[in-house]
Amino acid sequence: MDSLQEFDEPIFKYKQTGILKKNIIGISDAIFVFMMANLVSYLLFAEKYLDRFFSLVNVGIYFFTILILYRLATILLMSSTIAMRLLGTQYMKEGNLQLTVKEKLFAAFMIYIDGIRIYNLK
């Protein structure tokens, strides 16, 4: 038995997601948010009022607000976004620990904070 064996890193159930999968998740979420924001604007406002709505509201702020609301809702409910769920990933802390509500709120605004990472569930 090796004397340094007790200092080996523990084996965790889940492994961190690679950069390619993270980029696919980010692009998929961006497309989903764009489609959802357009759908919301068309459902809430008649087509003749859309030009007036977008002239009053900055389009960038509108899409950013929808993005934040989407991330808040999905991360608080599922600890992941819809694209993350489809690709079998989830936000967790180092050591494969579930996030607290405070950490979920931070994860909705910032991708990486205090060891919160995206892990593969498979």
Image: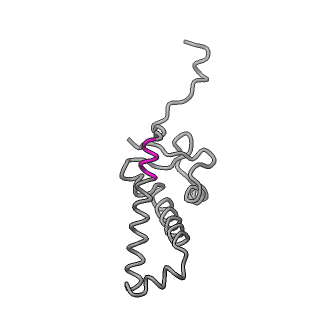
Q: Residue at x 51, y 72 (%)?
A: 59
**Which image quarter is the N terminus in?**
top right
From the image, give the main secondary structure of the stretch colored magenta: helix
Left of 106 or right of it: where is 54? left
Q: Residue at x 46, y 49 (%)?
A: 90
Q: Which residues, given as a range, are shown in magenta?
A: 20-26
Asked whether 117 falls inside the magenta stretch, the response is no
Left of 100 or right of it: where is 75? left
**Which image quarter is the C terminus in?**
top left
Q: Residue furthest right?
A: 114
Quarter of the view holding residue 121: top left
Q: Is residue 116 above or below residue 82?
A: above
Left of 111 or right of it: where is 80? left
- Residue 100, horizontal then vertical, whole percent: 57, 55
- Residue 104, horizontal then vertical, whole percent: 56, 57
Q: Residue at x 48, y 39 (%)?
A: 16
Tally of marks: 0
Q: Which residue is more in the foreground, 5 or 120?
A: 120
- Residue 36, horizontal then vertical, whole percent: 40, 69
- Residue 51, horizontal then vertical, whole percent: 45, 82
Q: Is residue 54 above or below residue 92?
A: below
Q: How is the image coloured?
A: one colour
Q: Is residue 12 above or below residue 53?
A: above
Q: Is residue 114 above or below residue 67?
A: above
Q: Residue at x 39, y 87 (%)?
A: 48
